[in-house]
Amino acid sequence: MGDVQVELDSEYDQIKSSGEASSLDGKEALLMYRRIEGTEKSVTGLTGKVESIVSQLERIERAKSKRRETMSKLLENITEVRLMLNSHRRRDATRLDCRVESRWRRRYILNLQLAHDNCLRVRSQSHR
């Protein structure tokens, strides 16, 4: 506000020396000065409020950014876990398939052996 006062004093001195001062008496000049001073205070207050709002918006934006990063990391972890689970499921399914196939193979071989033994027994009985 001091700068405004200096400028006003300077302008007033210029007007006074040029002879234009007769159009503006002291009371009107004081009134104008007070209006300008009030306007300056209002602008200063508004500037402070705007700066505060900008600061809050920047904080909100940083929080959003951190939230996005966190969500991104969580989604990456979920994807990794799903891939790992799918891999384990496939491996377990393959093991199960192998066990089932092995069991069926053994049963098939046992049945073949039983059938062969029965054939041999029937032949040996028929040749007697």
Image (spheres, helix red, strand yellow):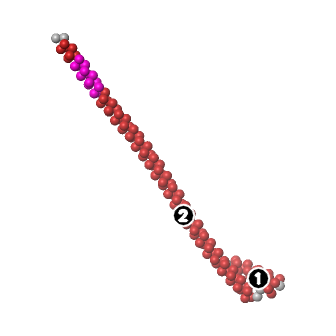
Give the quadrant of the C terminus: top left
Left or right relative to 70: residue 28: right
Tag 1's secondary structure?
A: helix
Left or right relative to 95: residue 63: right
Q: CA distance from mark 2 to mark 1?
A: 46 Å
- Residue tagged 1: 12
Numbered range of the magenta stretch: 106-119
**Residue lying at 81% horizontally and 84% vertically, measured from the top left:** 20
Q: Quadrant of residue 88?
A: top left
Eye-nearest disc, 2 or 1:
2
Coordinates of residue 90 in the picture (x, y in percent): 39, 38
Q: Which mark is residue 79?
A: none
Left or right relative to 37: residue 128: left
Q: Quadrant of residue 120?
A: top left
Q: Quadrant of residue 36?
A: bottom right
**Residue lying at 34% horizontally and 35% vertically, measured from the top left:** 96
- Residue tagged 2: 59
**Residue lying at 43% horizontally and 43% vertically, measured from the top left:** 83
Residue type (three-letter) at the residue carrying disc 2: Arg
Coordinates of residue 25 in the picture (x, y in percent): 76, 88
Coordinates of residue 3 in the picture (x, y in percent): 70, 77
**87 falls in the magenta region:** no
What secondary structure characterizes most of the magenta part? helix
Tag 2's secondary structure?
A: helix
